[in-house]
Image (cartoon, rainbow, N blue to C red):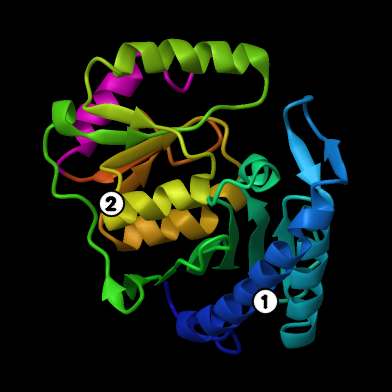
Amino acid sequence: MAENPGVPTPDELLVIAVRTAREAAATARRMRAEAITDVQTKSTDTDVVTAADKAVERQVVEALRVERPGDGVLGEEYGDTTATGAVRWILDPIDGTVNYLYGLPQYAVSLAAEVEGTVVAGVVHNAATGEEWTATLGGGAWRDGRRLGGSARTTLDQALVGTGFGYDAARRAHQGAVLAGLITQVRDIRRFGAASLDLCMAAEGMLDAYYEKGLNPWDHAAGGLVATEAGLTVSGLDGAAASSEMLVAAPSALFPALHDALSKLDASGGP
């Protein structure tokens, strides 16, 4: 995309994102013992939100208001704030809240910067482990100074594929049927419970590919950029863009076979 005068470069936005995400992750870790005693539900009884989700989101919004007062923030817990500038931040304060609740070490702060509708910088920070993935548009995807290039896998039958499930029982039933049809065509399936981390693991090659229906922008804005910049194809099915209907992330050699298998199984269908 063309440079926008007055808007920071992707690298400059990434510096802000990384600093803010690290501070937010420290708060999430510090609050865990307290936060898991204050648990509420959202869309269903299994869709939980803790006090830390809300506190971390407030912290990030306040930090960004100090650094970038005209920017908007789209967050999972408090929605979209009014913006006067060209930059909007997309935040999942704790991606993997159920993991957080149970003490499983896969929950992350995910923060991306979007300029005029295009995500240009993103960071995913695993608050439990300190692992961190970053990307800028056109600048590649990175972890600990190492550039990421995804998996070299080329055949679906040898692919380790990540996925996730929604909270609504009817949607889960459909997703379970899709999984039952796919699992005989792949090496195996993994479900870690945090979409941002799944996308980063695919970018790093710890998963060969990933797919999921029902993701929101905050679930995949940063991780999707990491995967894309690692060279993966990140898309929906049958020519559609990645959306809540379906997101598939896979190396170019593997994407067609996984796409066709998911399309035949109507993975983007159902409730």
Residues in magenta?
253-270
Q: Residue type at mark 2?
A: Leu
The residue lying toward the viewer, choosing from 79 and 92, is 92
Q: Is residue 115 visible?
A: no
Residue at (32, 79) in percent of width and height: 145
The one of 206 and 68 positioned closer to us in this rendering: 206
199 vs 243, left or right, is left
Q: For the residues marked 1 and 2, what is the alpha-carbon distance in whole angstroms?
A: 29 Å
Left/right of residue 187 with respect to residue 228 in the rendered view: left
Question: Which residue is found at the position 27% from the left and 20% from the top?
Answer: 261
Q: Earlier in the sequence, mark 1 or mark 2?
A: 1
- Left or right of residue 247, residue 238 in this image: left
In the image, is residue 96 above or below residue 69?
above
Question: What is the x, y in percent for residue 250?
Answer: 28, 43
Per the image, the residue denoted by label 2 is 232
Q: Residues within 10 Å of mark 1 (few under 14, many from 20)?
A: some
- The label on residue 8 is none
Quarter of the C terminus within the rendering: top right
Q: Residue at x 70, y 44 (%)?
A: 101
Mark 2 Cα-neighbour bin, 10 Å: few <14, some 14–19, many ≥20: many
Query: Which dot marks residue 23?
Result: 1
Q: If the image is split into quadrants, where does the N terminus sit?
A: bottom left
Q: Element under label 1?
A: helix
